[in-house]
Image (cartoon, rainbow, N blue to C red):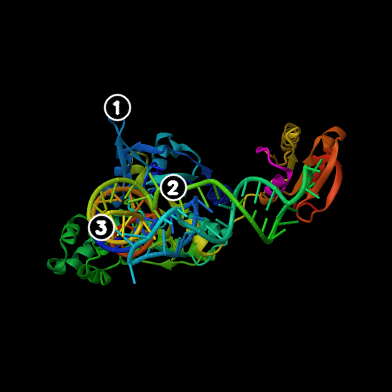
Amino acid sequence: MDLKAPRGTKDILPKEATKRQYLERAFEDLCHRYGYEEIRVPTFEYTELFVRGVGDSSDVVRKEMYTFQDKSDRSLTLRPEGTAGVVRAFIEHGMASWPAPLKLWYKLNMFRYEKMQKGRYREFWQLGCEVFGASASTADAEVIGLLDAYFAGLGLEGIRLEINSIGCPACRETYKAALRAYYEPELPHMCEDCQVRFTRNPLRMLDCKEDSCSRLAEGAPVQLDYLCDDCKEHFTLVRQALDKQGIHYLVNPRIVRGLDYYTRTVFEFVSENVGTQGSICGGGRYDGLVHELGGPDVPAVGFAMGVERLMLEMEAQGITLVEKPGPDLYIASFSATSADALALAASLIRQGLSAETDLMGRSVRAQMKAADRMGAGFILVLGEEEVTSGQGTIRKMADGSEETILLDAIGTYLKENKEGKP
RNA sequence: GUGGAAUUAGCUCAGCAGGUUAGAGUGCCAGGUUGUGGCCCUGGAGGUCACGAGUUCGAAUCUCGUAUUCCACCCCA
């Protein structure tokens, strides 16, 4: 083998695909019951979209994008996240004139050029939701509630919800001023990066991992204390709406999301089981993004959840998902009757059942073993006798009981005797 | 981008003070009365010991490089 899947990518083999289908269907079903509709957007966009949307001060844009030139020399980028593309589509198709609110969900693969680690890949999948047009706190609380319901429905426990408010552009300025006032006297003792951050974006000083800087950060003022009245009220109402749904959360004033477009509410669902950082899902409100990308002034809130991390969490909590069910009937045959067996299987499948036959030319004994291994509900040996007489013996694999049956009646018989039917 | 660890059959791993044809479990295939499963028994296929150099009479075992994965930073899903 000299060719491998590219670094950071992986094949999703049938066993894992089955698990993913389960998670995805549960999500889709829940979204539909909440009134969300699916949207699919292109795998790549013009690079400019992400630079303007996600923000050129974010790590994602600065060093993690898969960017390339196409044959007409346009710069394109494989999407590193979903929101920017969805917002672009929202604007491009005039969705602001659609009945509001517009509630969308998506299932998309994302691409980020990063160093590999557990729960971190260069191609990964996200399930997400976006709500456009609703500025009310209940929209924030709805998407969070949807996630809470999703995790609960999967049987997951102990995933911690952390929320914060980072205010609107107006109160963020007030906060930046407070930060600068706090840091200014200490500036000479801080690292070079922070000297630059001080003027460009003091918020990032809070993130600095230099010992001296991080010690200072502990005593730094917190955005929550500098919210304007509107933002403060919004945050209070979000919390109340969460309380009424019985959702537990932790206010974490230190949550600083990695993408630049967030306003007011930001939140994360975190766990100890999915790698160093533990974030399974992140989201928040982004009231300014649609306008910033050239659209009307439409508020929005949403989230994205990492499917691979979700799967790690499921595994860590010991939640096993149902395996692929075996066929309702396995029809064993001989070389002389293999085509008859195939025809019988095809007929049953057209009746809505599942059936398989041997494609390997194996002995009946080997076919029995195969049927058992794949978890077939019933088995029927179809030899020349059976084909001639039009009847055969059907055996229930679970207990070995057998019945003589007309071949024409098998469909009806199986429907009446399948698992789950009395 | 910085540092550390790992890499032997499909999978999980043993082997290594360097020495003839590289092992186990599991999985896979076949057989155990010519038309019958789950247990059990027997046999078989499957590895250029990640790749490439080097040291050596001789390397899966030592050294260096490359790749991949994992872990810690960084950051995010």
Camera-near label (2 vs 3) is 2
Q: Is mark 3 on a helix, strand or loop?
A: helix
Mark identifier at residue A10:
2
The amino acid type of the residue labelled 3 equals Glu
Determine the chain carrying the residue at label 3. Answer: A
User: Sequence-wise, which precedes: disc 2 or disc 1?
Assistant: 2
Measure how far apart labels 2 and 1 are at the Cα level: 30 Å
Instruction: Say above or below: A271 vs A6.
Output: below
What is the CA distance from the residue labelled 1 to the residue labelled 3?
41 Å
Tell which of A280 and A332 is nearer to you.
A332
- Under tag 1, what secondary structure? loop
Where's residue A361, x and y in %?
Answer: 68, 37
Which chain does the numbered disc 1 sit on? A
Residue A362 shown in magenta:
yes
- Look at the image and tell me whether residue A286 can be seen: no
User: Which residue is labeled 3 in the image?
Assistant: A173
Image side of residue A401 versus residue A282, left or right: right
Give the residues in magenta.
Answer: A359-370
Looking at the rendering, in which quadrant would you find the N terminus of chain A?
top left
Q: Given the image, on which type of amino acid does mark 1 rest?
A: Ser
Looking at the rendered image, the disc whose residue lies closer to the viewer, 2 or 1, is 2
| Mark toward the start of the polypeptide (1 vs 3) | 1
Q: Earlier in the sequence, mark 2 or mark 3?
A: 2
Q: Callout 2, which amino acid?
A: Lys
Answer left or right for A347 relative to A225: right
Q: Where is residue A293 in the image (x, y as percent from the top left)?
A: 33, 41
Left or right, A220 with reference to A78:
left
**Residue at horizontal 22 percent and vertical 66 percent from the top:** A210
